[in-house]
Amino acid sequence: MGHFGFSYIGLLFLLLLFIPNIIWTKKKPEGYTADGENPVLSLFEHIGQVFVCCCSLIFSDFNFLD
């Protein structure tokens, strides 16, 4: 558990998460604003996103061929 190395499965998972988000940012609904969002929850969300991205790429435990 917790073996360091590049995880290509983690990269695949991240691509599956990021591609729909990128498409959504290009085609946002008209009139959408993020004004009502709680800034503390938004901060925790961004911290979690960075943590998951780093962990999914630097731990090679999910690779099938290792």
Image (tube, rainbow, N blue to C red):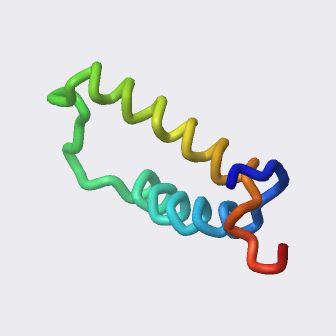
Image side of residue 1 versus residue 42, left or right: right
Residue drawn at (46%, 37%) of the image:
48
Image side of residue 35 versus residue 7, left or right: left
Q: Residue furthest top?
A: 40
Picture quarter with the N terminus:
bottom right
Q: Residue furthest left?
A: 36
Q: Residue furthest bottom?
A: 65
* Number of numbered labels in the structure image: 0
Judge whether 11 appears above or below 5 on screen.
below
Toward the viewer: 23 or 53?
A: 53
Residue drawn at (15%, 29%) of the image:
36
Image side of residue 14 versus residue 38, left or right: right
Toward the viewer: 45 or 19?
A: 45
Give the percent coordinates (x, y) of residue 27: 39, 59
Judge whether 33 appears above or below 65 on screen.
above
Toward the viewer: 36 or 32?
A: 36
Image side of residue 16 versus residue 42, left or right: right
Give the percent coordinates (x, y) of residue 63: 75, 71
Judge whether 13 appears above or below 25 on screen.
below
Q: Quadrant of residue 40?
A: top left
Toward the viewer: 3 or 14?
A: 3
Give the percent coordinates (x, y) of residue 42: 33, 29
Residue drawn at (48%, 30%) of the image:
47
Picture quarter with the C terminus:
bottom right
Residue drawn at (45%, 57%) of the image:
21
Judge whether 63 appears above or below 28 on screen.
below
